[in-house]
Amino acid sequence: MSENEIRPIDASVLPDIVLMGGLGKLEKPFERHILLTTFDIKGVNYVHRIRSLVRKLNLGDVLKLVREPHNEYDPNAVRIDTPAGKKLGYVPRIKADIIAALMDAGKRIVAVVVDTEVYKEDENYYPVKVTVELYLDE
């Protein structure tokens, strides 16, 4: 092979690769869950009894992601459900195309609750906020 040719990497050496900056070896936990993004779930205002659903959530809960390729508003729609399967809302449209493509390719994406807020009853426009982190589970 010439010096400029692309060569395949011997996968057996990957566990011994040392990260730059003296951080040490790449360990298993870091290759299993890769943080993709953090966001507030969209569309919560249209969910019946959303305050009740959000009050039942705990920090660290793993939520269900459901692809909706036939969604009339967005073919990249990814719905987010409670652990019990109740609809909470959606991945924001600006992030949904990448998440949908990963899911369509068979990748496992995990949503974890990192913050919730239930506003006073008289604040009707935004009654709740649910913040999640999405991880690629590799």
Image (spheres, rainbow, N blue to C red):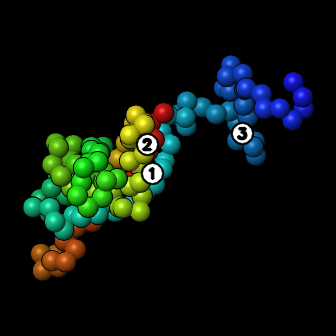
Image depth: mark 3 or mark 2 in front: 2
Q: Which residue is mark 3?
A: 19
Local crowd size for mark 2, using a 10 Å CA cut-off: few (<14), some (14–19), many (≥20): some
| Circle nearer the N terminus (3, 1) | 3
Q: Could you give the CA–CA distance between mark 2 and mark 1, rounded to whole angstroms?
A: 6 Å
- Which disc, if any, is residue 52? none
Question: Badge 1: few (under 14), some or many (20 or more) residues near its Cα, within 10 Å?
Answer: few
Q: Residue 103 lies in what quarter of the image?
A: top left
Q: Which residue is mark 2?
A: 102
Secondary structure under tag 1 reads helix
Callout 2–callout 1 Cβ contact below 8 Å: yes
* Depth check, front residue: 32 or 117: 32
In this rendered view, identify the residue nearer to me: 132 or 99.
99
- The amino acid type, in three-letter code, at marker 3 is Leu
Front-most of residues 94 and 41: 94
User: In the image, residue 38 lies at what x, y percent?
Assistant: 42, 57
Location of the N terminus (image quadrant) = top right
- Residue matched to label 1: 98
The mark that comes first in sequence, 3 or 2, is 3
As helix, strand or loop, the secondary structure at mark 3 comes to loop
Please determine whether, in this image, residue 3 is positioned above or below residue 74: above
Residue 8 x %, y %: 73, 26
Q: Residue at x 40, y 34 (%)?
A: 106
Q: Residue at x 48, y 33 (%)?
A: 138
Tag 1: amino acid: Ile
- Residue 102 drawn above or below residue 128: above
